[in-house]
Image (cartoon, rainbow, N blue to C red):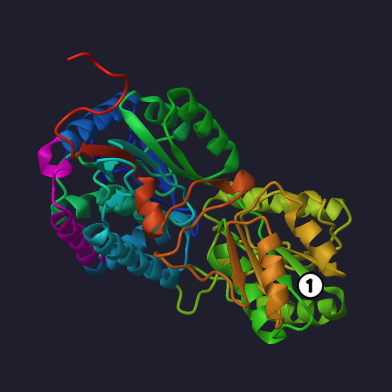
Amino acid sequence: MSTVAGVKPVPFLIGGQWIQDTPSYITHVNPATGEVNYQVCAGTEAHIDAAVKTAHAAASKAEWRGMLPHKRAEILNKIADLMIERSDLLARCQMLENGKVWKECKNQVINGAATFRYCAAAIETLGSEITPPRGNYLSMTVYEPWGVVAAITPWNSPITLTCNKIAAALAAGNGVVLKPASYTPTSGIELGRIALDAGVPPGVLNVVPGAGSKIGDALVTHPLVRMVSFTGGTEVGRRISELAGRKVIPAVLELGGKSPHIIFADANLKAAADAATVAIFEGTGQSCTAGSRLFVERKVYDEVLSMIMERARALRVDLPDAPGAQLGPSASFAQRDFVEKMVEGARQEGSEILIGGSRPSDPRLAKGAFYLPTIVTGVTNKSTIAQQEIFGPVLCAMPFDNEDDLIQQANDTTFGLASGIWTADYKRAWRVARALEAGMVWINTYKQFSTAAPFGGFKDSGLGREKGLQGIRTYQQVKTMFWSMSDTFDGGFSIAK
């Protein structure tokens, strides 16, 4: 396959070496303009084999496995420093590849650096435990790395999600093979470069892009891979879980969502309307935690919907690097086509499109994968558009009559990632929050995140948790040790002397 004329394809990283001699390339198209950005070298099954073996060898060396926690913390902090120094480069990689607006890309770099700093502080201070003995011995738990972690990341927020995985996995002492999404490979490649420059031993972190259908199975099923961390769609997550289960290795899965965003009549309606607008339209709706199902108490339904429509119409859809841009394009033309298909299906089922439902008319945006903020009403919670994850700027609005009705509808989905509640009644907030089948519940706010708080979902939204101290322990396995304090062996049956 030929490359872009006069431009060398972007190489990837194995064992501290930059690999450019590959049989095929990923041609990357800018979703905002339709123009080719560049080409990226695509890995093969042989590259995956080499990367995993390299990670295994590097992670087994005392240089990395036996590195003292404060020394590893120094490297993680250096990664954070270099991310800030190169923040424009990292942000531009993401903006060109998935169309996120510049401000959001920059913020994700800053937050990603903060994730490395948190993991550095945590690993330097996390301790083992002395467990209560039931005899003349000392018992304790210690934590060991799994070995080689396969980290597979999606295209919607690659900087954030890559940092969540590799910061914790490296902090825990593992080797890593990162497979970034084909749509968004270069921010992961640049993070690999930063890790090398920060002092991560060559081979500990490897980055191999390529189509998941070709190299994803090869990575997950490799006999030296001892743990998988995946963020992406639920169907692919099921496939990875099945493959990992055959090997009896853990798989941390952060999958899709169809999150209920609930507004009771006694809430601060202005703040709730502001949050509901951001919850679904930020990032062009391409977020697993997007508040895509809006439930509003019937007595204030029309009022709240009117407020959200006003705010949504005022949002600026523009080129990602345009000053003041709030929504960029879908991350790909295929994704924009899927969003259009879902909205058209809702029309055919009898739903009403209050605003949006089309591409923007601005000729400057005609060549990009843009779609207007869209609000759909006249749906029931059983409607296809209310049950299936759209991953676009589409809000399904539905009224509810009472608390029991609300909880039944909110939980009537296969997903269970995030949710939001707006009410002035703290007792109601507690009841509803405990009743919701979701891994994240925001009360009188939405999309508040902390690298110190565990993140993950219920039901088809995933398994396991990332972030926080629990997220670091995810990348370690527990070893129990017993240390006798006796001069003789006093266990089991008697042995004749």
Residue 143 appears in the rendering:
yes
For disc 1, the marked residue is 296
Q: In the rendered view, tell whether residue 130 sits above or below residue 220.
A: below
Farthest residue in the left direction? 63
Q: Assign the C terminus to one quadrant of the image.
A: top left
Amino acid at the residue labelled 1: Val
- Residues drawn in magenta: 61-83
- Main SS of the magenta segment? helix
Residue 377 appears in the rendering:
no
Farthest residue in the top direction? 496
Percent from the top left, x then y, of residue 22?
28, 30
Percent from the top left, x then y, of residue 196?
16, 50
Q: Residue at x 27, y 65 (%)?
A: 117
Front residue of this view, candidates 296 and 427: 427
Q: Is residue 8 left or right of residue 101?
A: left
Neighbor class of circle 1 (other Cα within 10 Å; few <14, some 14-19, many 20+) is: many
SS at badge 1: strand
Q: Assign the N terminus to one quadrant of the image.
A: top left
- Tally of numbered discs: 1
Q: In the rendered view, tell whether residue 81 sits above or below residue 486.
A: below
Quick check: is 62 in the magenta stretch?
yes
Percent from the top left, x then y, of residue 254?
51, 48
Q: Residue at x 59, y 49 (%)?
A: 256
Q: In the rendered view, tell whether residue 483 sits above or below residue 377.
A: above
Front residue of this view, candidates 488 and 213: 488
Percent from the top left, x then y, of residue 48?
31, 29
Location of residue 159 by image quarter: bottom left
Q: Residue at x 43, y 24 (%)?
A: 247
